[in-house]
Image (tube, helix red, strand yellow):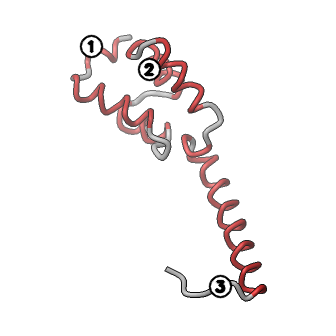
Amino acid sequence: MGLKASLTEAERSRLIEMAWEDRTPFEMIRLQYGLTEASVIDFMRSNMKKSSFRMWRKRMNGRLTKHLTLRSCSTVANHVISDAVLNKKVRKGMVGVMK
């Protein structure tokens, strides 16, 4: 991969860190490094041990927070669920001092 040669060790390390982070979407990696999701996968495959790569792929597979378009839907769903739980507690008189 040509990108590997153009990145410093610190940049490679940061890219791997961003790819592992649940809250860093692939779109952010694309903005900073110009890599598509497929390119990030190829980069991770060539920069990690086989077992580590498999573990990362298993973890990232279906992770909503790694895609901005899916994240916005999941965020809305989480707010709806949180509101429903809170409303249920209020109706039952279970809400006390909230932090």
x, y (%) of residue 64? 62, 44
> Regarding mark 3 in the picture, which secondary structure is present there?
loop
Name the kind of residue labelled 3 in the image: Val
Q: Residue at x 49, y 19 (%)?
A: 53
Left or right? Give the position of 34 relative to 89: left
- Labelled pair 3, 1 in contact (Cβ < 8 Å): no
On-image quarter of the N terminus: top left
- At 72% from the left and 80% from the top, the residue drawn is 89
Q: CA distance from mark 3 to mark 1?
A: 57 Å
- The Cα–Cα distance between marks 3 and 2, rounded to whole angstroms, is 46 Å
For marks 3 and 2 on the same chain, the one whose residue lies earlier in the sequence: 2
Percent across and percent down for residue 42 are 48, 16
Q: Residue at 61% across / 55% down in the picture?
A: 72
Q: Tell me the tag on residue 5.
A: 1
Task: Report the residue marked by disc 3.
Answer: 95
Q: Amino acid at mark 1?
A: Ala
Kind of residue at disc 2: Met
Circle 2 — which element?
helix
